Amino acid sequence: MKKRSQRMALLQDLAERKKRQADQFMADSRARVNQGEVTLRQLEQYLTEYQQQLQQQGQAGIAVAQMLMARAFVEKIEASIRQHRETMKTNAEQLEQVEQYWRQAYGHQCAMKNLTERALTQERVEAEKQLQKELDDRSQRVRTPFI
């Protein structure tokens, strides 16, 4: 039968794999949130620039049909921004869940590491006691020639 520390080391390895997986989940989730923020800024900047350009054209004079098409395009951009904000909200909620999962995985890994270290320490102490007992037994069996 394997020693307790060996069994605990196997559990510790599994916990480390789970934590590495959680690390990857968190990195992916953070990247999605960061990319979403960048995309939102780009959409908002594009909308602002388009509206400014449209305003300049309106001051110079623009056909009603062209103005209606431009207004419909602005509404589509605004709808895209709203939809993107909803997606960002979902991504942020998922990030919170992933962070919670990561904290659990990290805590479990630390606990397994501590248990493995305790098992190793206990085995060392027991081995030292056994060795001392054997040495004591041998020293009592050996008779000195002077007696």
Image: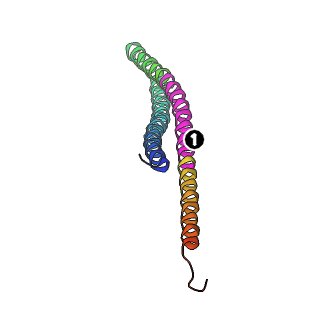
Name the residue nearer the viewer: 107 or 4: 4
Side of 70 relative to 130 (left or right): left
Category of crowding for the residue at label 1, using alpha-carbon neighbours closer than 10 angstroms: few (below 14), some (14–19), many (at least 20): some
Residue closest to the far front: 147
Residue 60: horizontal and vertical position, in percent? Answer: 45, 26
Q: Nearer the viewer, residue 96 or 112?
A: 112
Dividing the picture into quadrants, the one containing residue 46 is: top left
Q: Name above or below for residue 111 compared with residue 94.
A: below
The segment highlighted magenta reads 85-114
Work out which quarter of the rendered image holds the N terminus and state it.
Answer: top left
- 65 or 111, nearer to the observer: 111
Colour mode of the rendering: rainbow
Q: Quadrant of the C terminus?
A: bottom right
**Does residue 86 lie above or below 120 as drawn?**
above
Q: Secondary structure at mark 1?
A: helix
Q: Main secondary structure of the magenta part?
A: helix
- Residue type at mark 1 is Gly
In the image, is residue 39 part of the stretch drawn in magenta? no
Say which residue appears at 44% left-offset and 22% top-offset: 80
Instruction: Provide residue 61's location: percent of width, then percent of height.
Output: 44, 22
Residue farthest to the right, as pictured: 147
The residue labelled by disc 1 is 107
Task: Between residue 11 and residue 3, name the one nearer to us.
Answer: 3
Q: Position of residue 35 (x, y in %)?
A: 45, 37
Q: Residue at x 48, y 27 (%)?
A: 51
The answer to whether residue 93 is magenta is yes
Q: Position of residue 27 (x, y in %)?
A: 46, 41
